[in-house]
Image: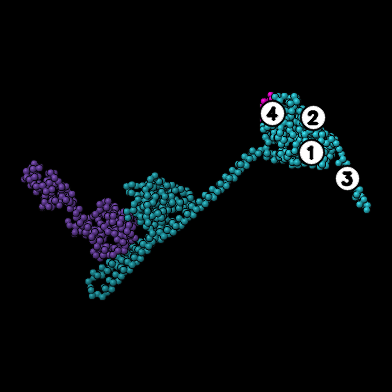
């Protein structure tokens, strides 16, 4: 299940179909697959974070402002990067777009190379974000499989506490600690302590701990 | 010859007549008889003695006459000299050439110019009669209406008090001379009060004929050094008059006789005084020389109601003054109003100018948007074409190179067109900067001033609901005004079908958002879903005469200043314009 193998979608949202068509055509020339969003209202129902991609959206649309949509997406914690474009941009609008969490802002008409570069960068960013999210989900699932004792020992291990000390602390034999360690590393599907620490970091577990 | 003879004859005749007159040794002296005859003779005894002493060869004949008798004698030229009261003299002097030779010395008083007065007496027991006003509706006794000291002086006093002797006195009993008989009437209570010459009472008392204690003066006037009771002003004593029948030499001899003492008896007369003071009195009473001007009932009325008249005049004067003041104030205020109107007009002109500029900017922005879309599409296609062409494997194809170049040129031309539009828009948007701290209350008042005519015309009342403490907002004054004026105009347009109504403007300070929210609620048609979606599009309008730029311009202006503008349907049926204005512009 590698996201690298998944197709990349560039989502397009503009109130003018002819412009959307021209964009589709331009992006196809560099092999980018596009998805046209017909209505801004069902934006949230779309599978935006299913595969890496980017949303290219107009700011000024009749029903709703692109800036408002951007804020809505961020509120719903959508990871998909958003690039805004406007036919009558000014500094104020650009600043607002960036502050609202846009990845880039283009004034129409735009230079194709700059747009493509920005889109590529956004797609890579999305892919990384998705991978990170996926890994996190996986670790979360594995963490849930651990017993309370295993969780307890894992927390101590990632803080760098030695097995003997853990045994003393929990008043169990070092042998038992070893068994738990073996089991938990298997359940977490990690082969080294470093990988375990990495998982703990991702899961945002407390690392700085002192007896 | 004959005529000369005749002339000489007539001259001699004339001389003879004159000589006869000159030679007449009898001097006729008329005297006004105001007491009984015996008393009069004794009164003038010193004068008679003086004549006898200094003019022994002249025979003096004394004629004691009544007022009318004197007049008749004068008319018949029977008198050479005359002694009468000052009033009578002034009255006669109108018709006869009378010259005062001397004025009587008052035996009681050494101030001859103040010798004659008049007094109103009542019985001492009548305690309720003490002032002029008490004389209302009583019976009053007097000698005659012609009597100077006996009536006219009191008449004058009464008139000055606003009393008319003919109207206000119940009955006037006239006895004629002699004057002392009035005391009998009073004693017998046939009259309530009597008018007598001043000093008569004192003379009678001295003669032992009355007891002064039995009488009381009405409205007594005190004159310093004057020993008699008076109720009136004082006038000069009686004059000795020459009627002009005697030669100047004879008159001089008479005058010398009058002024000189006889033996140890002092002269009864002294140098003549002016009787001028009698004239104003007669003028007031329309007597003597002034009788020709009969009493005007109108003037009388004026006189009677003079205080009321003064009051009314004063009132009129005040009214006039008030009128002047009012018209002055009106003029001043209308001037101020005119000035204010001029100012408002100037402002409106300024705003209209700026508004036109802003509309052009919005027009350019709208156009730019409309043209930018196809332009962007064109450039997209051209750039895509360029990429595709370069991907074609066939460097030997001679058509590839010009096609790539053409695609490049399409992109370049498209970008040039976009640049032109961008420049135009930038130019139009110039001057939209200049934000400053402004008081929303003041801006709203200014807006109301601009819209007042339109609001009145449509009979719509703009009700502002302002909280106590509103912070300043960061705004460009003209653009803020433009937005609000656009919104109110919009609300008015929406309410065009209504005969009257309200537009409510709610203002609140939202502390979390660090902004001020203006909500303008109208009572118009409201917003259909279709209209609501397109309302901010440039050139979209629901009115046939509308341009469709008002709201789109307002939103552009608002967002350029960091504010947001939305139009929502209101629960009550109308529309609500929702303007959120930041206190600080973060852009």
The answer for how far apart the CA atoms under marks 4 and 3 are is 59 Å
Question: At numbered mark 4, what does the secondary structure look like: helix, strand or loop?
Answer: strand
- Report x, y in % for residue B396: 23, 75
For the C terminus of chain A, the quadrant is top left
The residue carrying mark 1 is: B255
Identify the residue at image location x=91%, y=48%: B9
Q: Name the residue under label 3.
A: B15
> Could you tell which of marks 2 and 3 lies nearer the N-terminus?
3
Q: Which label's residue is closer to the chain start, 4 or 2?
A: 2
Is residue B127 rendered magenta in the image? yes
The segment highlighted magenta reads B120-133
Kindly identify which numbered label has been placed on residue B42: 2
Quadrant of the rendered image containing residue B44: top right
| Of the image marks 3 and 1, the number of the one nearer the N terminus | 3
- Report, in whole angstroms, how far the alpha carbon at label 4 lies from the one at label 1: 38 Å
Q: Supply the letter of whichever chain is purple.
A: A
Q: Earlier in the sequence, mark 4 or mark 3?
A: 3
Answer whether residue A139 is visible to the viewer in this image.
no
B132 relative to B582, above or below: above
Instruction: Let me know if marks 4 and 2 both belong to one chain.
Output: yes
Compared to residue B542, the image places residue B80 above or below, namely above
Q: Which chain carries label 2?
A: B
Q: How crowded is mark 4: few (under 14 residues within 10 Å), some or many (20 or more)?
A: many
Distance of label 2 from label 1 (alpha carbons) = 21 Å
What subunit carries mark 1?
B
């Amino acid at each position: 299940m590698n996201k690298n193998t998944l197709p990349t979608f560039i989502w397009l949202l503009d109130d003018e179909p002819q412009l959307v068509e021209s964009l589709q055509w331009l992006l196809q020339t560099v092999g980018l697959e596009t998805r046209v969003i017909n209505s801004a209202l069902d934006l949230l129902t779309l599978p935006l974070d299913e595969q890496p991609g980017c949303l290219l959206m107009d700011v000024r649309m009749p029903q709703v402002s692109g800036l408002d949509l951007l804020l809505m997406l961020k509120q719903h914690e959508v990871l998909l990067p958003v690039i805004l474009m406007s036919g009558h941009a000014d500094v104020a609008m650009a600043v607002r777009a960036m502050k609202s969490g846009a990845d880039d802002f283009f004034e129409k008409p735009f230079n194709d190379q700059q747009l493509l570069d920005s889109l590529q960068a956004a797609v890579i960013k999305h892919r990384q974000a998705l991978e990170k999210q996926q890994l996190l989900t996986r670790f979360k699932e594995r963490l849930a499989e651990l017993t309370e004792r295993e969780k307890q020992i894992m927390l101590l291990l990632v803080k760098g506490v030695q097995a003997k000390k853990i045994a003393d602390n929990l008043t169990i034999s070092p042998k038992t600690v070893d068994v738990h360690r073996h089991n938990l590393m298997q359940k977490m599907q990690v082969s080294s302590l470093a990988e375990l620490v990495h998982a703990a970091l991702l899961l945002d577990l407390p690392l700085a701990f002192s007896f | 010859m004959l005529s000369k003879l005749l002339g000489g004859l007539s001259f001699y005749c004339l001389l003879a007549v004159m000589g006869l007159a000159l030679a007449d040794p009898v001097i006729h002296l008329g005297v006004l008889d105001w007491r009984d005859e015996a008393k009069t003779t004794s009164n003038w005894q010193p004068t008679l003695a003086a004549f006898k002493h200094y003019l022994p060869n002249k025979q003096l004949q004394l004629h004691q006459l009544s007022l009318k008798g004197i007049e008749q004698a004068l008319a018949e030229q029977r008198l050479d000299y005359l002694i009468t009261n000052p009033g009578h003299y002034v009255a006669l002097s109108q018709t006869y050439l009378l010259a005062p030779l001397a004025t009587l010395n008052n035996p009681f008083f050494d101030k001859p110019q103040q010798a004659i007065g008049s007094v109103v007496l009542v019985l001492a027991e009548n305690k309720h009669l003490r002032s002029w006003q008490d004389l209302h509706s009583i019976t009053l006794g007097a000698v005659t209406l012609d009597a100077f000291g006996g009536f006219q002086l009191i008449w004058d006093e009464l008139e000055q008090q606003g009393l008319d002797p003919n109207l206000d006195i119940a009955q006037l009993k006239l006895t004629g001379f002699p004057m002392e008989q009035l005391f009998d009437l009073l004693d017998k209570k046939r009259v309530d009060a009597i008018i007598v010459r001043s000093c008569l009472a004192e003379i009678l008392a001295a003669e032992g004929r009355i007891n002064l204690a039995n009488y009381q003066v009405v409205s007594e006037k005190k004159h310093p050094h004057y020993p008699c009771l008076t109720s009136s002003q004082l006038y000069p004593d009686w004059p000795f008059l020459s009627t002009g029948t005697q030669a100047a030499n004879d008159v001089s001899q008479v005058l010398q006789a009058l002024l000189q003492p006889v033996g140890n008896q002092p002269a009864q007369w002294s140098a003549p005084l002016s009787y001028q003071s009698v004239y104003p009195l007669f003028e007031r009473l329309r007597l003597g020389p002034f009788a020709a001007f009969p009493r005007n009932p109108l003037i009388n009325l004026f006189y009677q109601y003079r205080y009321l008249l003064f009051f009314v005049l004063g009132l009129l004067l005040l009214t006039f003054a008030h009128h002047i003041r009012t018209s002055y104030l009106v003029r001043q205020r209308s001037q101020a109003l005119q000035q204010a109107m001029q100012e408002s007009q100037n402002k409106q002109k300024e705003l209209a100018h700026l508004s036109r500029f802003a509309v052009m900017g919005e027009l350019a922005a709208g156009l730019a948007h409309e043209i930018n879309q196809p332009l962007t599409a064109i450039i997209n296609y051209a750039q895509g074409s360029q990429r595709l062409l370069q991907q074609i494997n066939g460097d030997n194809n001679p058509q590839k190179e010009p096609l790539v170049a053409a695609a490049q040129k399409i992109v370049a031309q498209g970008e040039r067109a976009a640049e032109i539009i961008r420049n135009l828009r930038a130019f139009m948007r110039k001057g939209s900067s200049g934000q400053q701290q402004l008081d929303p209350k003041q801006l709203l008042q200014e807006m109301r001033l601009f819209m007042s005519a339109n609001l009145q015309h449509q009979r719509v009342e703009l009700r502002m609901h302002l909280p106590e403490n509103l912070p300043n907002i960061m705004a460009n004054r003209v653009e803020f005004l433009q937005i609000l004026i656009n919104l109110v105009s919009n609300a008015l347009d929406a309410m065009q079908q209504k005969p009257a109504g309200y537009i409510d403007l709610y203002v609140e300070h939202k502390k979390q958002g660090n902004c001020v929210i203006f909500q303008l609620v109208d009572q118009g048609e409201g917003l259909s879903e279709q209209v609501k979606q397109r309302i901010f599009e440039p050139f979209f309008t629901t009115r046939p005469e509308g341009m469709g730029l008002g709201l789109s311009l307002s939103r552009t202006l608002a967002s350029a200043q960091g504010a947001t503008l939305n139009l929502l349907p209101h629960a009550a049926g109308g529309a609500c314009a929702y303007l959120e204005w930041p206190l600080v512009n973060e852009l």
